[in-house]
Amino acid sequence: MGKFKMMLLMLAASVLLLAACGKDDDGKASGSDSGSKDAGYELVKKGKFTYAASGVYKPFSYEDNGKLTGFDIEIGEAIADKLGLDPVPVTNPFETILQGLVAKKYDAIIGSMAYTKKRAEQADFTEPYYYSGGMIWVSKDNEDIKTPEDLEGKKIGVVAQSTYEEPAKELSDNIQYYSSDVVALKDLTVENRLDAVITADIVGYEAIDNGFAIKEVGKPLWVEQPSIAVRKDNKELTEAIDKALKELVDEGKYKEISEKWFDRDLLDIDLEGVELLE
Amino acid sequence: MPEVLVTIYEVFIRTYKGFLEAGLLTIEITAIAVVIGTLLGLLFALMKISNSKILQTIANLYINIIRGTPLIVQIMFLYYGITSIIILSNFWAGAIALGIHNGAYIAEIFRGSIQGVDRGQREASLALGMNRTQTMRRIIFPQALRRAIPPLGNQFIITLKDSSLVYVIGVSELFGLANREAASSFLPLETFLVVGLYYLVLVMIFTALLRWYENKLDVDK
C-alpha cells in the first residue's frame, strides 16, 4: 500500500511537471493554434509574422554574430512591415521545413524554397520572389566532368528534400544526402569523397568567395522559382503576402534588398527560352 | 597545421558569445531531461518491481518501446508527429523527448540497484517490525541510491551529448548553432572542432562534480 502511495505521488509529480511545461509553452514559444485572428489570417503568434528558413544557406539565410540575417530574412522583414506585423524569423532544418509549416510551427517559409508541383500538394505558394539557377559544382582540379552527362555513375552530393535531389538522381544513381550545402561543397574539396554537388549558382559563387577550391560546370541546368510557402488553410495570408511582394517590387524596395546582397536585381532576368523547373 | 590552429582560435573568438548562450540552452535541456528522466525512471522502476501484473506490463511496454526506437525518431514524433494532440515549442518537445528517452534507461538503473540490495536487508528490517514502506525508505533505498550513482552519472553524460540531436527540430543549442556557424563562415572543420571542445569541457565539469558527490556519499565502500 505504501509503495503504491509513493508511486501515485511520483505520477502526480510528473503530471504536474508536464502540465507546467505545457503552460509555459503556451505563454511564450509556440503559442496557440486556436486561431488568433489578425486581419483575417491565422497567425501562429498574434501580431507577429513568423517565417522559417534553414539558416544554413548563405547569403540567403545565415547567422552573423548570432543574428539571423540574409536576403530571405530581409524579404521577410519587408513583408512583415507591409502586413503591419512584427517579423519573427526562425530556423528549421530544410528536410523537415514543410512538415513544420503544416504542423503550424510558423506562418510561412521564406527559405529559398522553389515552387514544385509536388510541394504545392502540401502548401500554397506565392509568386516567385527571385529566380535562381541549379548548377553543377566540382572540385577545382577536376578535369573529368565537363558536361552533365559526365556525371553518370559519379557520386553527387545534394541537400535532402531540395529541388536538386530529383535532377541529381536522373544524372547518377550514386547520391549522397546533406543537410547543408556548405558541408556538401566542402566535401568536394576532400579527395575521393564526392565528384559533384548540385546547388544554386549564387550559393556556389559565395563559397568560392570564401576560399572553397571549387568551380562550376557549364551553365545552370535550369531556372527555378523560389517562392513563399503558406499553409493551405491560410489563403488570406498567401494573398496578403503576394500583394505585399508586388508592392515591394513596385516601390523599388525589393531591388534595394536584392542589390544589397547580390549587386543585382534577382527578379530581373530574361526568361526567354529558359527551362523553368516545375 | 599552425594555420588551422589560428583559424580555430579565430572561430573560437568570434563565436564564443553565441556558444555560451547555446551552451546554456544545452545545459537547460539536459537538466530538464535529467529531472523528467529521473522521475519517470523511479516511477517505472517501482512499477516494474511491484506485485501488480498490470503495472509491470505498463512499465515493460514503456521501457521496451523507448529503448527499442531511436531518440531522433522520438524527438521528431513529439515535435512533428502528434501536433493534433499537443503542440509543444521545439525547446520543450526536445527536452521532454530527451527526458522520456532517459526515463527508460534510468528505470532499469534504479531497478537493478534496488534489486541488487541483499535480500537479507529486507528480511531483517521486516523482522525488526518495519512495514514495507519503512523498509523501502529507510533501508533499501539509501543503499540502492548509492549503487545507482555511478551508472546514473554515466546516463546523465550520455544525455548531455544526446541533447545535440534536438538540433533536428531547430533548437539553437550547441550543435544547432555550430551547424549554422559552419554554414555562414564556410569553416565546417574548425567550427565542429570548437563545438566538440565545448561538449568536452561540459562533460569534464560534470564528471568532476560527480566524483565529488561520489566521494561524499562514499560510494566505493
Image: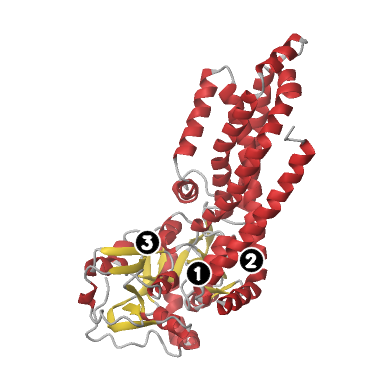
Front-lying residue, A241 or A118: A118
Instruction: Please tell me the numbered disc located at residue A55.
Output: 1
Q: Give the residue drawn at x 62%, y 48%.
A: B157
Give the residue at mark 3: A123
* 1 or 3: tag closer to the N-terminus: 1
Is the N terminus of chain B in the top left, top right, bottom left or bottom right quadrant? Answer: bottom right
Q: Chain of mark 1?
A: A
Give the distance between the C-alpha atoms of the residues marked 3 and 2, in whole angstroms.
35 Å
Callout 3: residue from which chain? Answer: A
Q: Nearer the viewer, residue B45 or A131?
A: B45
- In the shown orientation, is residue B27 left or right of residue A188? right
Q: Nearer the viewer, mark 1 or mark 3?
A: 1
User: For the residues carrying marks 3 and 2, which lies nearer the camera in this image?
Assistant: 2
Q: In which quadrant will I find the C terminus of chain B?
A: top right
Q: Secondary structure at mark 1?
A: loop
Residue B113 appearing in the image: yes
Q: Secondary structure at mark 2?
A: helix
Residue A84: where, in percent of width, then height? 56, 72
Based on the displayed image, in which of its 4 quarters is residue B139 positioned?
top right
Point out the residue furthest to the bottom here: A263
Using the rendered image, report if marks 1 and 3 lie on a common chain. yes
Identify the image quadrant of residue B111. top right
Q: Are marks 2 and 1 in contact (CB under 8 Å)?
A: no
Q: Residues within 10 Å of mark 2 (few under 14, many from 20)?
A: many
Relative depth, front residue between B24 and A188: A188
Q: Amino acid at mark 2?
A: Phe
Q: Which amino acid is tagged 1?
A: Gly
Residue A276 is situated, as x and y percent measured from the top left of the image, at 26, 77
- The residue that label 2 is drawn on is B19
Secondary structure at badge 3 equals loop
